Image (cartoon, rainbow, N blue to C red):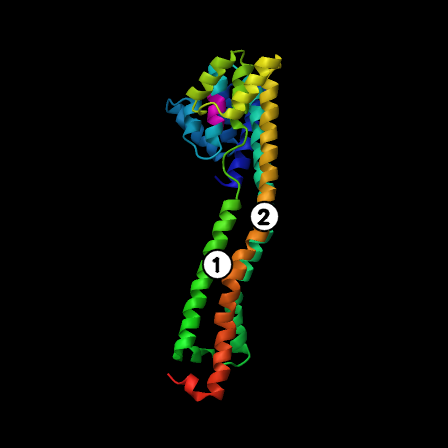
């Protein structure tokens, strides 16, 4: 799922909510969105005309649309107000996407720096050539060949290591607090908590998560509205995800020093400084420059 796909899903869901609040039927709302040029809406309308239900058509779409399909199916099953449910779910999608965007911005600088530093060994070779050193003579010397092979191996290792560190720092595609939002939609339809959990599970919302169970248990003990508690907990989960993502990005800057020190700098010495040194020594001592 790309960031643009998630943003587009939130925008379309918000537009549908406005149309539904204006009294437009769900099928016609999707038709209007398709007429407006939205490709996803056009795909959904085509599926509906083929006899497929709206929720089923949405569940076949990738990325965030599967979460939208769960919310849509739950709202239809319990008879929850569809327009307010979609509007709140669009807000949840935007909130989650904002968290990903914040993390992506925080990761951009250390990731770009790591990519730039990875090319330092090759820059050193170019510098040696520019200064007039006979770098090509390195390939006629066993020590030079060993330097080149080890240097290239270290460069590859640094790139793989850096790529893995950046990948592990990326936020996941799952929307934090999603199940709480969906259960809140089910409860807004007036059903009991137990019935809401069953409906969510049947709509492919997954088994009840510990956080959802904790919030519902608090609602039972305190007699507080479960819907408000669930939505507050979902918003807090997304806030925590944003904070954790920023912390991961901050840690990444320090972790990227490991491949820099262990692999990139030795590769710089082997590919840059080594050939220049061998070039100088081969001129001073012909034995070293012999094949």
> Tag 2, which secondary structure?
helix
- The relative height of residue 55 versus residue 80 in the rendered view (above or below) is below
Q: Is residue 182 magenta?
A: no
- Residue 116 percent across, percent down from the top left: 55, 60
Q: Is residue 158 above or below residue 216?
A: below
Looking at the image, can residue 18 be seen? Answer: no
Q: Residue at x 51, y 79 (%)?
A: 277
- Can residue 126 be seen from the camera position used here? yes
Q: Bin the neighbour count of mark 2 within 10 Å (Cα to Cα): few under 14, some 14-19, many 20 and up.
A: some
Residue at 54 percent across and 61 percent down: it is 261
Residue 60 x %, y %? 40, 30
Which percent across, then down, holds residue 263? 49, 62
Name which of mark 2 and mark 1 comes first in the sequence: 1
Within 10 angstroms of label 1, few (less than 14), some, or many (20 or more) residues? many
The magenta segment is 68-73
Report the quarter where the C terminus lies: bottom left
């Amino acid at each position: 799922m790309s960031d643009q796909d998630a943003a587009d899903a939130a925008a379309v869901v918000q537009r549908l909510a406005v149309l539904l609040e204006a009294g437009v039927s769900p099928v016609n709302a999707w038709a209007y969105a398709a007429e407006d040029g939205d490709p996803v809406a056009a795909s959904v309308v085509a599926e509906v005309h083929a006899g497929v239900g709206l929720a089923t058509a949405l569940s076949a779409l990738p990325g965030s649309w599967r979460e939208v399909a769960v919310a849509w199916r739950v709202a239809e099953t319990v008879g929850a107000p569809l327009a307010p449910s979609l509007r709140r779910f669009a807000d949840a999608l935007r909130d989650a996407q904002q968290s990903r965007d914040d993390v992506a911005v925080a990761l951009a600088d250390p990731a770009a720096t790591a990519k730039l530093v990875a090319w330092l060994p090759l820059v050193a070779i170019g510098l040696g050539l520019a200064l007039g050193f006979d770098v090509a003579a390195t390939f006629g010397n066993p020590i030079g060949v060993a330097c080149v092979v080890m240097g290239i191996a270290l460069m590859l290792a640094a790139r793989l290591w850096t790529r893995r560190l950046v990948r592990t720092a990326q936020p996941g595609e799952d929307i934090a607090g999603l199940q709480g939002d969906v259960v809140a939609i089910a409860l807004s339809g007036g059903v009991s908590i137990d019935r809401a959990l069953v409906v969510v599970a049947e709509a492919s919302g997954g088994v009840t998560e510990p956080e959802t169970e904790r919030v519902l248990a608090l609602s039972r003990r305190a007699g507080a509205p479960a819907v408000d508690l669930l939505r507050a907990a979902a918003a807090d989960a997304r806030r925590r995800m944003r904070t954790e993502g920023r912390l991961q990005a901050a840690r990444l800057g320090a972790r990227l020093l490991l491949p820099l020190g262990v692999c990139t700098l030795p590769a710089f010495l082997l590919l840059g400084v080594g050939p220049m040194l061998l070039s100088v020594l081969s001129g001073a001592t012909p034995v070293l420059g012999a094949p």
